[in-house]
Structures are given as structure tokens and as C-alpha cells.
Image (spheres, grey):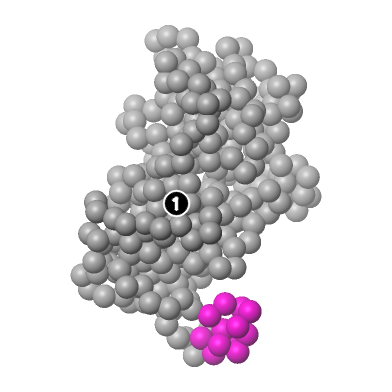
Amino acid sequence: MDSTSSIEGNRVTQAVSGDQPMSGGRVVAHIYGGLGNQMFQYACGRALALRNGADFQIDDREFTAGPGQLFSLHHFNIVRQSGAAGTLPPTKKERVRYLIWRYFKGTPKFTREKGTAFDPDVLKLKGDICLHGYWQSERYFEDFSDRIRDELTIITSPDEKNRKVLEEIQNCQAVSVHVRRGDYVSNPKARAYHGLCSPEYYQAAARFIAGKLACDPVFYIFSDEPDWARAHLELPFETRIPGHNDSEHNYEDMRLMAACRHHIIANSSFSWWGAWLNPSPDKIVIAPAQWVANAASENPHITPESWLRMEG
């Protein structure tokens, strides 16, 4: 794929010569939230553009996220813009233009996610579209999974410490374990909505995977609170906790997770991608049976069909 790229601040702009529109139209992906959310938003928008032969643009001008969360897609092999994508829609700061655009249904058409479950109508969208939502299902982009996996390959070179851990992972029967805490603990609303995976969930999942393998696994535990994991998460197997990457370098943890052979994920879009980026058809991925504590908001399509669900 022939491409040219330039740096805009700390962002990557990439124009891809092989992505010329076949039927016209444009897809604008609104990017916000943590890294896992950013990746879902990119994947859904990019796949829709490829499906329609349309131009594609990332819009992160009003990027918002939680504490410690940054725009991080520039560490990946993304296509920020393909074709002559045109002018982005007005932002909320341009109050009059924004209200006119929304009220009179201007172009690109503002399309908001209707709920957490997969919406097949999104696959049928045509014309100029601005996507706003989380789009947390592989079904939005599984017809272009190889392309998405390539574009969501991390291209920022690992530092020496991460390179050494990566070599270790590649030379053993490594299983990634992701323990999500952070605002799931500190923010009462987030905790009530998301809930937490219990130590018993991780222990049961580790025993299940170990029982399926011919040789002893090594469990690599990744967490936004590695000290908590060291103190409270005991697995009856060899474990290693590479807790050296801070939130600004969370993409490094994702690269390490994706390099593992099997995965135990939390109810977290971050660890979802750490498992999904592993292309092996033989991988075992275990996810919590209940993705969110608020059952009314449960996404029945959050995990691919080949992944296993276990009580958490």
C-alpha cells in the first residue's frame, strides 16, 4: 500500500493512494475516550468507508477523555485521512454553525449510536456520514478484519525495557491477564456501571487455560494499578507483572498483551483490543460473562463468538 505521511503536532496524517473512492461519500469518525474506545471508533468508521469506497477522516478536534487518557492513535499504522475528504463538520465551539448543521441535518449526516448492542443498520449507511458513538463490536468491521488489524499495528518503536519483555513473551507460553481498576474503583458512578472482575474470575480463567495447554504457561499481568495486582491477585502459576508503563505509554502494554498466545481480559475495551490484535486462530480468550454491572446496558455483541465467557 503506497502512502505518504506527515506529522501535525503529535498526530499522524496519512494519505493513501490506493484508497480512492468508488461510489463517493465520506465517513468522519469522531474520536474520544480511552485508547480502546478510540480503536473501536476508528475501526467502525474505517470499515464503513472501505465498505462504501468512501473518503475517510478522523475528527479529534474536541477530543475528551478521562484522567490520564490521551489521544494515542498516532502510535498506530492508522489512515487519518484518505482521498479528498473535504471540510470537517462544525464543532460545538462554533455554536451557530453547529446548531444549523444539526437542526437542518447538514452534511456529513450526524449519526449517533443508538445503544450498546450491535446495530446492523450502521453497515448499510451511505453518503456523507459523521459517526458518533463507541461501536463496541467486531461485527462493525469483521469483513475488513485483516485490514483493521494491519492499520491498528503499533508502529512506535518499543524502548529497551519493553523490547526485553516482548522477547520474553515471544519465547514462552505467555498468557496476558488484564486487571482494570482506575476509575472503575475511584469513581462511584463508573464502578456502579462497569463493576469489577474478581480475583476468583482470574484464578478460574487461569486454571482453565492452563488445563488446555501442553506446557506450563507464564501469566503476564497488566494493570493500571500493578501494585494492587502484586498484593491481591495470586495465581497458582508463574506470574510476571511488567508494571513499568504509565498511562502515557499504555500502547506499550497493548503491544505486549497482543504478543501473548492466550488472553484473560477484563470488562475493558483496552484488554479487548489486546486480545483481538493477536491474529492466531488458536488463541484462547476468556472474557467476563457480564460485561457491565448495569444489566440494562449489557452489550450482547461485545465479544467475538470464538471467545469464552466466564463468571467474573
Q: Nearer the viewer, residue 15 or 295?
A: 15
Q: What stretch is highlighted in magenta?
A: 90-101
Instruction: State the image coordinates of residue 166 (x, y, percent, origin top left).
Output: 47, 24
Q: Name the residue under label 1.
A: 137
Q: Does the magenta stretch include residue 96?
A: yes
Q: In this view, does 21 lie to the left or right of 268?
A: left
Q: Residue at x 24, y 53 (%)?
A: 2
What kind of element bears circle 1?
loop
Instruction: State the image coordinates of residue 27 (x, y, percent, origin top left).
Output: 38, 69
Decide if residue 269 is in sight here: yes
Q: Is residue 9 magenta?
A: no
Q: Residue at x 67, y 18 (%)?
A: 234
Q: In this view, does 211 lie to the left or right of 292?
A: left
Q: Residue at x 24, y 61 (%)?
A: 17
Instruction: State the image coordinates of residue 105 (x, y, percent, origin top left).
Output: 47, 86
Q: In this view, does 156 lie to the left or right of 239?
A: left
The quarter of the image holding the C terminus is top right
263 up-or-down from 9: above or below:
above
Q: Which amino acid does label 1 sit on?
A: Ser
Please tell me in which quadrant of the rendered image residue 230 appears. Answer: top right
Q: Which residue is drawn at 43% across and 29% down?
A: 259
Q: Which of 120 and 274 is in front in this view?
A: 274
116 up-or-down from 199: above or below:
below
Q: In this view, does 184 lie to the left or right of 129?
A: right
